[in-house]
Image (spheres, rainbow, N blue to C red):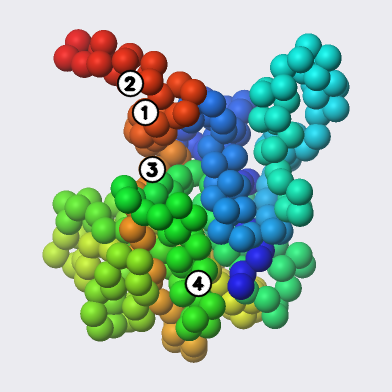
Amino acid sequence: MIRKAVLPVAGFGTRCLPASKAIPKEMITVVDRPVIQYVVEEAVAAGIRDIVLVTSASKGAIENHFDTHAELEASLEAKGKQALLESIRDIVPDGVNLISVRQGEPLGLGHAVLCARPVIGDDEPFAVLLPDVLVDAAEGQARGDSDLRGMLAAFELTRRAQLMVEEVDWAEVERYGIVSPSDAVPAPGEAAALAGMVEKPTRAEAPSNLAVIGRYALPGAIFPLLADTPPGAGNEIQLTDAIEALRESQGVQAYRMQGLTYDCGQPLGYLEATLAFGRRHPALGEDFRALLSRYRGK
């Protein structure tokens, strides 16, 4: 089973400006915790034990968030604020390792993943989780039956790279990377082989309405391919180019998720995520729903 994950967090977050000018976009909060914490929790719940943060000089706040803060813990303990103390002690569970590597230059997602090569190695599979996308479970989905866990299980079963995909409205396909299934479209919770992928196609050109949403399960064999991948769109090393080379040599599958995603890389996505997670928050949910009722129609 895959036990390692790469989280690329070195980007500027320009879609979130001005909020992300001095604060990493991954540290902007949804309800009561930063987005990056939700993604780490998702990874840990799926069995990931080594998390590699590909970071940059301006992202020290992310590393600090997951580090121990002895002075703050001592202060909370002295004041008897046990619930708050536990909330910061439990950010990283025992047995989970967070490792930071630097991406010295912003050379693209493919390059960011390649920066994790010395930690992951070429012989071990791993996951990639984009930290500005929150994955929410479907209504009725069994506890612990997350989409990430399902995708990792599909990799374990087939030994084929997996791209998590979500069905989107046909009118919005031009905003996404869209996959082309080689045969049948996979049902939710299932995987199917890919014939390729089209980046931001028009409605007429789109081979399906299944969009890649920022969760990948990849073999270590992707690293040599990334190392040989020339700069592509935007003069950056594109992960999708290396995945296409992998598809041609080994095959790649699309895992169709059951739940929903929220794109927290842009302001409306943050607002939608706040609505979704705030309404069912165990401590704040009831009052938050009352606030929504108060402002409805205003």
Pointer 2 with pointer 4, Cβ within 8 A: no
Image depth: mark 3 or mark 2 in front: 2
Residue 153 numbered tag: 4
Amino acid marked by disc 4? Ala
Corner quadrant of residue 113: bottom right
Residue 142, x across and y down, in percent = 40, 55
Residue at 43% across / 49% down in the picture? 135
Query: Which residue does the numbered mark 2 point to in the structure image?
Result: 289
The Cα atoms of the two marked residues, 3 and 1, are separated by 15 Å
Corner quadrant of residue 189: bottom left
Which of the two residues, 188 or 13, is positioned nearer the viewer here? 188
Query: In the rendered structure, which disc, 3 or 2, sits on the residue that comes first in sequence?
Result: 3
Which of the two residues, 43 or 132, is positioned nearer the viewer here? 43
Query: In the rendered structure, which disc, 4 or 1, sits on the residue that comes first in sequence?
Result: 4
Residue 133 relative to residue 113: left or right: left
Amino acid marked by disc 1? Arg
Image depth: mark 3 or mark 4 in front: 4
Circle 3: element type: strand
Pointer 1 with pointer 2, Cβ within 8 A: yes
| Residue most extreme to the left | 204
Residue at 68% across / 55% down in the picture? 51
Query: In the rendered structure, which disc, 2 or 4, sits on the residue that comes first in sequence?
Result: 4
Query: Which residue does the numbered mark 3 point to in the structure image?
Result: 262
For disc 2, the neighbor class at 10 Å (few under 14, some 14 to 19, many from 20) is some
Pointer 4 with pointer 1, Cβ within 8 A: no
Residue 243, x across and y down, in percent = 48, 74
Up-down relation of residue 9 to residue 199 (above or below): above
Pointer 3 with pointer 1, Cβ within 8 A: no
Which of the two residues, 163 or 230, is positioned nearer the viewer here? 163
Query: In the rendered structure, which disc, 3 or 4, sits on the residue that comes first in sequence?
Result: 4
Res 213 visible:
yes
Res 234 visible:
no
